[in-house]
Amino acid sequence: MPGRQAIDPAFGACLKALRTKRRLSLRRLGQQIHCSHGYLWDLEAGLKRPSPSVLTLLDAALDAGGELLALASVVSADVGEASAGAVNAGGPTVPGLEFAADWQRGVAVATELWRDDMQRRDLLRGVGFSAAAYLSPAVRWLTAPLDESPASAGERLVGEPEIEAVRRVTGVYRSLDNQFGGMRVRDSVVRFLDTEVAGLLRGRYDMRTGRALMSAAAEATQLAGWSSYDAGLHGLAQRYMVQALRLAAAAGDRPLGAEIMAAMSHQAAYLRASTEAVDLARAAGLMAAQAGVAAIEAEAAVLEAQGHAVGGDEAACAAALDRAERAFDRAERSSDPQWIGYFDEAYLSAKFGHCFTALGQGKTAARFAVRSLDMDGQAYARGRQFNLALLAVAHVQCGDPEQAAVVGVQAAMAAERLNSRRARDYLADLADRLGPYQGLSAVDEFSERVLPLLRSV
């Protein structure tokens, strides 16, 4: 095993001084080196060590002339920390990116991923993410015929009661994820997949039962991916999403496949991969249209808009937002799959708000952020925290840092009940935006409230 990095205690202060000298926010620097701003905040606060690749990118981006490199006496990756921020950093060999040619191989790859996640969890936290790696599975889904016959002759008989149990357990975990964050439920979902679902997939079932089982397994696998994403484990999240898509293909479940590709787009946009986010959202929209589920079409369109916004394309963003509104208006929600129940006017408003903050249009973003708070804040506690942080950012962009700080305190209080890396990253971004306004009483109160929270995650 290579040695751990020995970082000079002055590293964080040096990094912050270099960044400030170049007038870069944490968010902008993160975009340049493909790291989350929350991870960079950790580096400046001395809470994390940079991986070798991140260290090199930082030194180059800040034109440090080797100054940052000199503060690291041993250049070796700390796996757990690299995963928190290095989007394209390398890592251990992990199954999961393969979109298998047949359903039997797909089951083998998925169950291997679940088993490895249980047995090598600490090691796998460092696996890297590449948005481009999503595109091949999406193309395979769109071009391969969904006419497989997943029937198995294993020993254990699998029927509707077992499949219903998988769906119900997944539903419970999904609710907990929404209420408490992905870091609270991720490990339990993976354990459920490895100890329960894997055995069912190796059981005995006919084609009709097999398709229902594959669909239920795909839902649970997507949730493992989503909670991994929320926990900041982006490389693992990507592998779960790819395998969820493969299982959905085996099931012939087009609506679920569209939803999974929408989730891929969501993650890509969060990590500033605008081109891939747009392509994945368009693929999701195409599949949703073929499946006849207008709500997923609306979701795909608003995610496409967010991808355009992240890339700075205001015209394309506006066109996609218009399509999202029209698709949402014609959606007949009574026949929607139960797993898309979260997609309502408040969620749509939040996505509009994120688009406008990405474009720097705080006044418009604030209107939608206010609408996004008209939601069930108990069942979707994490979403409410995100929306409060969104509103606070909009206030900063409107030139009202004091109101931003007041709302930011509310967002910090909401985050105290969550185990969510994204919740913390949104707060770190807000803290960075409010940094120039230190000295205002409201901003100082926000800083005092948020700093222990950011250090505790």
Image (tube, rainbow, N blue to C red):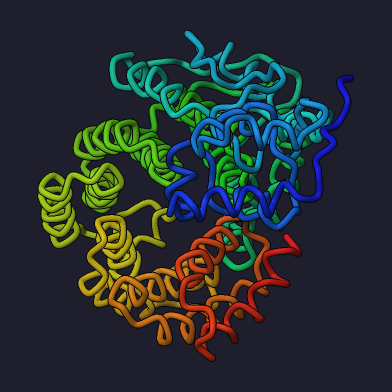
Residue 24 in the image, given as x and y percentages of width and height: 44, 52
Q: Quadrant of residue 77?
A: top right
Q: Is residue 324 left or right of residue 83?
A: left
Residue 326 in the image, given as x and y percentages of width and height: 11, 57
Residue 226 in the image, given as x and y percentages of width and height: 55, 46
Q: How many numbered markers are drawn?
A: 0
Of residues 81 and 419, the one drawn nearer to the viewer in this rendering: 81
Quadrant the N terminus occupies: top right
Question: Does 4 sit above or below residue 147?
Answer: below
Q: Is residue 408 left or right of residue 362?
A: right
Does any portion of residue 217 appear in the rendered image? no
Q: Quadrant of residue 313?
A: top left
Of residues 439 and 195, the one drawn nearer to the viewer in this rendering: 439
Does any portion of residue 322 appear in the rendered image? yes
Q: Is residue 451 left or right of residue 57?
A: right
- What residue is shown at x 12% (from left), y 51% (from top)? 323
- What residue is shown at x 54% (from left), y 85% (from top)? 439
Question: Does 23 sit above or below residue 410?
Answer: above
- What residue is shown at x 61% (from left), y 33% (from top)? 54
Of residues 294 and 320, the one drawn nearer to the viewer in this rendering: 320
Residue 438 in the image, given as x and y percentages of width and height: 53, 79
Quadrant the C terminus occupies: bottom right
- What residue is shown at x 69% (from left), y 16% (from top)? 93
Q: Quadrant of residue 95?
A: top right
